[in-house]
């Protein structure tokens, strides 16, 4: 199914409103999930909207919650999320952080006791669009082991950065987890009766395996390197904010279970430090140096971080957003549940 981006976003927003959310919350959720789909990151896009709303109905996300500013300084803030919708908590944190960064040059904002907020990259990209070098991360459930351990010991906590990129692209950005493979890819391999690549999971004894039918845990990206980054993200999100440390349930496992994730956002104001034109010129130089570097045999293009995602985003804007089968099925379920017209979105 190919849909108009604006109509599909309005469809998702109306589903949230029908589920009892305030328009400003519904707008944030629909905007970030649809933009995630536009980037081609369908595992974290509108595929999650139906589970979010089911979790809301069961009490696992608090429908009427609003983020509360509990501590702040000139260049930092802590928000209490009250187990509300993650994308809305993130939007509120970003608004506070960018306002502070315009005054101080740099700002750091944390949200504690939130919920799953989707893909990190869409938040980082939005900060870069406002002229900020942006870093965001979230802690997650303990699905990753650590060297020398067995079972889930720490989350494969994802992070993303985005940098305003001058003339070549809207931004250079990276969005990655700290494990060698995403957990959903392991589950897909299990469903398909396939093995996973070596070095991605360990079995119940903490030993390397390629069998997704074991009681597996993810293995850190680069071994001790991914583990070290994941631990640092835990500090920057939950430890420093006063949120719940490490022991967070997997958000999708039980609809009625609160999953108090913590997020962080760092904004560096390039306008204040260097001036927009000067920074853009220097970024153009850095980007062109990489793009025009010598190519390997058989290669005619070097991609910048985030370039593939921007290509997908722009194509969706021009030609319509193509919904994979599982995303389409979830959209149809939303239409049925909330008496919405999905056909009106078809391009």
Image (spheres, grey):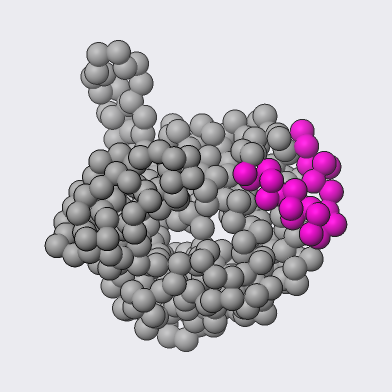
Residue in the image at 32% along x and 46% along y? 211
Q: Which stretch appears magenta?
A: 326-347
Q: Which percent across, then down, holds residue 48?
A: 59, 56
Quarter of the image where one finds residue 142 = bottom left
- Specify the principal SS of the magenta part: helix
- Left or right: 295, with 114 as reference point: left
Q: Is residue 280 magenta?
A: no
Q: How many numbered marks, from 0 up?
A: 0
Q: Is residue 8 visible?
A: yes
Q: Is residue 187 left or right of residue 290?
A: right
Q: Pick whichever, 8 or 179, lies toward us.
A: 179
Residue 65 image offset from top left, x and y in percent: 62, 80
Instruction: Report the front residue among 220 and 33.
Output: 220
At which x and y percent is residue 186? 40, 48
**Is any atom of residue 285 visible in this view?**
no
> Which residue occupies 40% across, 38% down?
194
Asked whether, in this view, residue 263 is left or right of residue 201, the answer is: right
Q: Is residue 256 above or below residue 306?
A: below
Q: Quadrant of the N terminus?
A: top right
């Amino acid at each position: 199914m190919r849909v108009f981006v604006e109509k599909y976003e309005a469809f998702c927003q109306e589903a949230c409103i029908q589920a009892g959310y305030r328009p400003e919350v519904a707008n944030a959720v629909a905007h970030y999930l649809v933009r995630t789909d536009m980037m081609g990151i369908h595992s974290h896009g509108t595929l999650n909207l139906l589970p979010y709303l089911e979790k809301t109905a069961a009490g696992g996300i608090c429908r009427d919650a609003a983020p509360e500013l509990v501590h702040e300084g000139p260049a930092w803030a802590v928000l209490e999320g009250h187990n509300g919708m993650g994308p809305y908590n993130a939007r509120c944190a970003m608004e506070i952080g960018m306002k502070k960064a315009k005054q101080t040059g740099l700002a750091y904002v944390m949200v504690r006791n939130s919920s799953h907020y989707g893909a990190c990259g869409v938040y980082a990209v939005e900060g870069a669009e406002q002229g900020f070098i942006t870093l965001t991360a979230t802690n997650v459930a303990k699905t990753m082991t650590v060297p020398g351990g067995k079972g889930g010991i720490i989350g494969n906590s994802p992070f993303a950065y985005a940098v305003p990129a001058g003339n070549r692209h809207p931004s250079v950005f990276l969005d990655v987890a700290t494990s060698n493979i995403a957990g959903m890819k392991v589950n897909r391999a299990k469903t398909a009766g396939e093995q996973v690549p070596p070095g991605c999971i360990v079995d119940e004894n903490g030993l390397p395996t390629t069998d997704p039918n074991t009681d597996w845990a993810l293995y850190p990206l680069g071994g001790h390197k991914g583990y070290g980054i994941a631990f640092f993200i835990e500090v920057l999100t939950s430890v420093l904010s006063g949120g719940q440390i490490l022991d967070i349930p997997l958000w999708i496992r039980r609809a009625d279970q609160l999953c108090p994730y913590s997020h962080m956002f760092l904004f560096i104001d390039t306008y204040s430090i260097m001036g927009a034109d000067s920074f853009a010129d220097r970024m153009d130089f850095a980007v062109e140096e990489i793009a025009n570097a010598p190519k390997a045999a058989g290669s005619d293009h070097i991609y910048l971080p985030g370039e593939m995602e921007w290509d997908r985003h722009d194509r969706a804007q021009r030609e319509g957003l193509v919904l994979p089968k599982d995303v389409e099925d979830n959209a149809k379920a939303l239409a049925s549940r909330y008496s919405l017209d999905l056909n009106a979105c078809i391009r």
